[in-house]
Amino acid sequence: MPYEPPTHTVERSLRATTGAKVIAGVDEVGRGAWAGPVTVCAAVTGLRRPPEGLTDSKLLTLKRRTTLAAELEGWVTSYALGHASPEEIDEKGMTAALRLAAVRALEALPVRPDAVILDGKHDYLGTPWRVRTVIKGDQSCVAVAAASVIAKVQRDKMMAELGAEHADFGFADNAGYPSPVHKAALEERGPTPYHRLSWAYLDGLPQWRHLKKARSWAETSAPGVEGQLGFDF
């Protein structure tokens, strides 16, 4: 499929307008999953030419994404991952959980970034971070695209390892997202310790509804949260 390769345009603009030298691209994966953590990758790439075929992880085949992630991990200047657990998502809400995971990733980098390019239109990081949001940044910005691919491959690997304990749920294939196999296992066995228990899918499971956790955070505090849908049979 033809595509426009990502560029360093936003990084160059940040360097010119803010004086930033170390700029991290940040992207998340797992926002819409019913199970597992939300994972954020922060990647610093500098202005070097990226590996061929780099783009948003969702546009890549599994084989190409896996190969590219291995290449990127040696190509980037640095990268780090941050996670927010299902318990933290239930307790804080998705927006706060995203910020927690992103801060963990950024603070794990060997050098603190002067600026951050954040995929999407919502700045869930806020102060003290200097943030530039870019819609579809995972397609247009080199550092964000690199973060997208690394985050996706690393979280998929993590979910496959967690799924070894719960083979009926198919986590190795669905990474905790709703799928027919996942839904069938939920109906029969109920949620695993890795499921998010404040989400609406439990409303469609009468025998397990008593496990649902009440939200202590307001719905309005979490704009842009995706995937919190119930069963649609």
Image: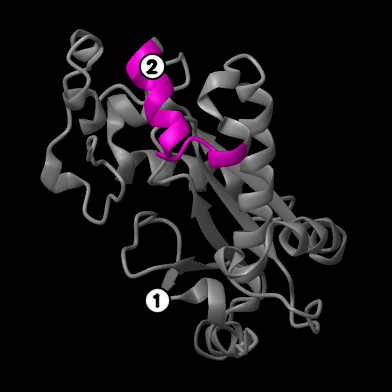
Q: Vertically, is 31 above or below 116?
A: above
For residue 122, say whether it is visible.
yes
Badge 1 amino acid: Ile
Check the picture and name the quadrant holding the C terminus: top left
Colour style of the rendered protein structure: one colour
Q: Judge the density around disc 2: few (<14), some (14-19), many (≥20) Cα neighbours within 10 Å.
A: many
In the structure shown, which secondary structural element does the residue marked by tag 1 occupy? loop
The structure residue drawn at horizontal position 65% and vertical position 67%, both measured from the top left corner, is: 60
- Along the line of sight, which residue is nearer the eye, 117 or 57? 57
Q: Is residue 115 left or right of residue 197?
A: right
Disc 2 target residue: 191
Magenta span: 173-188
Which x, y percent locates residue 167?
A: 60, 20
In the structure shown, which secondary structural element does the residue marked by tag 2 occupy? loop
Q: Vertically, is 229 above or below 165?
A: below
- Along the line of sight, which residue is nearer the eye, 90 or 48? 90
The structure residue drawn at horizontal position 22% and vertical position 16%, both measured from the top left corner, is: 212
Q: Is residue 18 left or right of residue 90?
A: right
Q: Please, what is the dominant secondary structure of the magenta stretch?
A: helix
Badge 2 amino acid: Pro
Comes first in the chain, label 2 or label 1: 1
Disc 1 target residue: 135
